[in-house]
Image: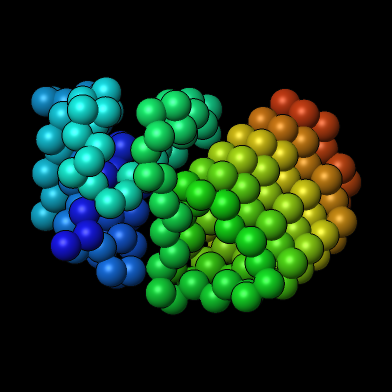
Amino acid sequence: MKRLAILGASGHGKVVADIAECSGWDEVIFFDDAWPGVSANGDWIVEGTCQSLADRLDAFDGVIVAIGNNTIRAEKLHWLSDIAAPVVTLVHPSAVISQYAKLDIGTVVMPGVVVNVSACIGKGVILNTGCSIDHDCTIGDCAHISPGARLAGGVKVGMQSWVGIGASVKQLINIGHQVTVGAGAVVLADLPDGVTAVGVPAKLM
């Protein structure tokens, strides 16, 4: 029996649990720092805090972080690395991933996602429902590409950046680290680190 531990019992965590079961994991157990005052509200249980997982690692075949906040997700992944946890990557069966794309550990690929040839996806990335990552894109560690976002060829997205729902990014654009791209924005020019850009075309706030 393959058992998976998930850090984070939010709505995002439930989606990750469903993807895990769809991709062959037999049992999913949640750990959340709000325990015991938190529930996964589904067919899954929360057994303790994230820290309590450290004493039970040998009971699980894999671990993944299901926390939407990019900074917190990065911190949890770093901690899991320190304790030598078996971090895994999850891909929904309906996703289309080129055999020539690369996915690093801790990444979650949700239903309907397309990742094309020579794309490189970093650690702990969320590729959310129905987003499209075209050829030669690079997505930095712990970035989040939201549902329905479209990245044309050769786009680079920095670490812990967030591309909002339905946003579009023109080919060969560079988006810096810890950038927020607003919902529905159309990015036609490079964005430096740490900024927020919204609108059509996207402009800095």
Regarding residue 63, the answer to whether it shows in the image is: yes
- Front-most of 80 and 98? 80
Q: Is residue 196 left or right of residue 144?
A: right
- Residue 146: x and y, percent? 54, 52
Q: Is the C terminus in the top left, top right, bottom left or bottom right quadrant?
A: top right
Number of numbered discs: 0
- Residue 122: x and y, percent? 62, 48
Q: How is the image coloured?
A: rainbow
Q: Is residue 57 above or below residue 119?
A: above
- Residue 175: x and y, percent? 78, 42
Regarding residue 128, the answer to whether it shows in the image is: no
Q: Is residue 171 above or below residue 76?
A: below
- Residue 130: x and y, percent? 52, 66
Q: Is residue 183 left or right of residue 78?
A: right
Which residue sits at x=56%, y=44%?
Answer: 123
Q: Is residue 123 above or below residue 97?
A: above
Which residue sits at x=62%, y=75%?
Answer: 99
Which residue sits at x=57%, y=63%?
Answer: 131
Question: For residue 56, which quarter of the picture?
Answer: top left
- Front-most of 52 and 115? 52
Which residue sits at x=44%, y=76%?
Answer: 94
Question: For residue 55, which quarter of the picture?
Answer: top left
Q: Is residue 142 left or right of residue 15?
A: right
Q: Is the N terminus in the top left, top right, bottom left or bottom right quadrant?
A: bottom left
